[in-house]
Each structure stands twice: as structure tokens, then as C-alpha cells.
Image (cartoon, rainbow, N blue to C red):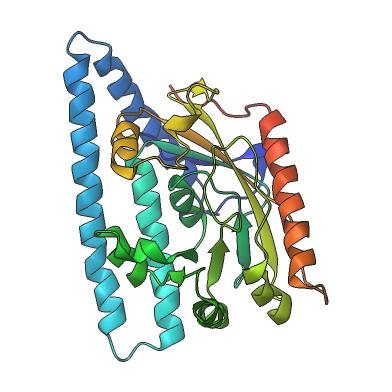
Amino acid sequence: MPYAMSSVQGEKTYSDRPGENMLYSDMGLFLTSAVHRTIKKPWGATCHALLKAYRAAALLLLCTGTLVPAFLIGALPFIRKDARMRMRARCMTLWARACCFLLGMRVITTGPVPVTSPIFIVSNHCSYLDILVIGSLMPAVFISKDDVRSWPLLGLLTQLAGTVFVDRGSKSASVASMEEIRGRLRSGVNVVLFPEGTTNDGRGILDFKSTLFHVPAETDTPLLPVSLRYSHINSLPVTEETKDIIAWYGDMEFLPHFRSLLGLRSITVRVRFAGPLYAAGQGRKVLSSHACAHVRDGYEALCTERDHFPAGP
């Protein structure tokens, strides 16, 4: 079940410590190879079911265990509000990395992962896994639809992580959400927005909704376009027939989709970071249009990029 943070052509990833990325890679490759050899045996169906059960139990334990430090961070009165938000974002990063490892995800980056903050990050969106991928690469809080707040366990976890919830049906609520986003940025925390407003099948990128681009436009916060593409499932390239194993969109139900995903040996996702954009007096619609063009260009580059790293055993 590999979780490898790799970079293409020697470019920088989240870690400057020698050997850290290889440690994740080697450990993940070893575990995935062991599982792969096991499920080829006649009793492979049983092992496959056990793998799903193991991952489900481990993720449940991880999520419930993460609630404890999250509650403590929020309860300690001597921690300043901005410091508390930064601690929550770092806690989110550790949680996301652990989830990626348990799900057998290999994350390969192109372009320098930013080391300064705050940054307003925008990305294409095709799966709930996108949150884990971006969250594992840098400390950040996410902007989410308001209905996620009511999800069992995950809703509480996202609230404790500092997520900004947006009710698109209420103009006054949107104004309040933008003020929350400004507060996160003032605290020195990166903010992640999926400006398509919904997930899709991963074959293309929808036009960006420009409303929340008002925040980086008025504050002149650097805006970072990020492109995601899931390239391999179980070491095989994603095809038209297999894309829905990863993509979650439309009327798909969460639990059946997630149960299926738990049985995958490995998932390879490629992440491309573009250079930061600055408003420089541009309005939100112009800034949104430029960001969308950069994300689309990055996605097209990922589609044509040759594999510098093996997808896994």
C-alpha cells in the first residue's frame, strides 16, 4: 500500500530531508508487492476481503484518533487563534499523509511545492481523494459545501480541521464565508478551493465559478493553480472503463464507491504546480479565468507527460 512522494526531474517536493521520500516509497512498494503476491493465490478473494476490512478499520481508527489532538488544540486557552489554526492545518497534513499511505496512494509532483504561506490554492476536482492528495503535500484548510458538515465523523473532523463551509444558496452566508477565508489567510494558513463547484469524471475541467476569487483579488494573496490527474490503478493506466473507480461525481453513492476503492492495490496520482498568480488590480472574473486556463494547461501537460517513475509493482 504505497504512499510515495516523488518529484519529476529532480524538482522539489514537500521534504528537504534526504531519504524521507524514498523511505515512504520503499516501504510502500514492499507492502504492495506482498499484497499483490498474496492475492494471486487461490484464496485471493479472502485476502482481498481482509485487505478491505483492514483498511476500513485502520482508517476508522485513524479518524477517531485524530479527533483527540484536534479537540485539544481547540480547547487549550493559552494558544492564540492564529497559532491554533496553523496547528490544525499541520495536523490535517499528517492525517492526509496517513490516509494516502493506508489507501496505497503514490503522489508524484511536477513543479515546486510552495514552502511559503499564505497561498490561495485552486485545483480541478474529480474525487474526494483530491483532498487527501493536496492536504498531504502542504498544510492547508479547505473550502467545502455546507452539507459536508453533517456527514458522520468526517463532518466533525473537517470542522475541527478549520474547513470553511459555503452555503451557495445564501448570499449572506457566502459573504460570511469569505470573511472566514480572509481570517484563515490572515492567520498564515493556505486555503484550498475547488472552483468548479462540483466533481466530474476527470476527463476535463469545468469552467471556474468566480465568486470566491474576490478574496485573493482584494487581498493580493498569491494564487496557485494546481492540476491533478489519476494516472494508474493497480499499476495499469486509467482508461475510460476504469476512470469511475477513482472519479466520484453525479449521483454516485459514497459508501459503495469507497468500499470498492478500499480493495485497490495502488493508485498513482500526478500533481502539477504552476507558478503563482497575482491579482495586480484584476477583478475576480479575470483572475478566475486566468487560473482556470493554467489548471487546464497543467492537466493537458499531465496527460502527455511520460512516466518518469513506475506506477508501482
State the residue lying farthest toward the bottom.
78
Q: Give percent across and percent down for residue 134.
A: 51, 53
In the depicted view, which residue is nearer to us: 173 or 289? 173
Quadrant of the drawing holding the C terminus: top left
Vertical arrangement, residue 210 with respect to residue 111, above or below = below
Q: Give percent across and percent down for residue 235.
A: 47, 22
Vertical arrangement, residue 253 with respect to residue 41, above or below = below
Dividing the picture into quarters, in which one does residue 149 lie?
Answer: bottom left
Vertical arrangement, residue 98 with respect to residue 214, above or below = above
Q: Give percent across and percent down for residue 226.
A: 64, 52
State the residue lying farthest toward the front.
169
Residue 276 in sight from this viewpoint: no
Residue 92 in sight from this viewpoint: yes
Quadrant of the drawing holding the N terminus: top left
From the viewer's perspective, is 298 left or right of 174?
right
Dividing the picture into quarters, in which one does residue 264 lie?
Answer: top left
Residue at image point 21% right, 50% down? 60
Residue at image point 71% right, 29% down? 304
State the residue lying farthest toward the right.
281
In the depicted view, which residue is nearer to us: 5 or 281? 281
From the viewer's perspective, is 263 left or right of 279?
left
Residue at image point 47% right, 24% down? 242
Residue at image point 78% right, 58% down? 290
Q: Give percent across and percent down for residue 302.
A: 67, 36
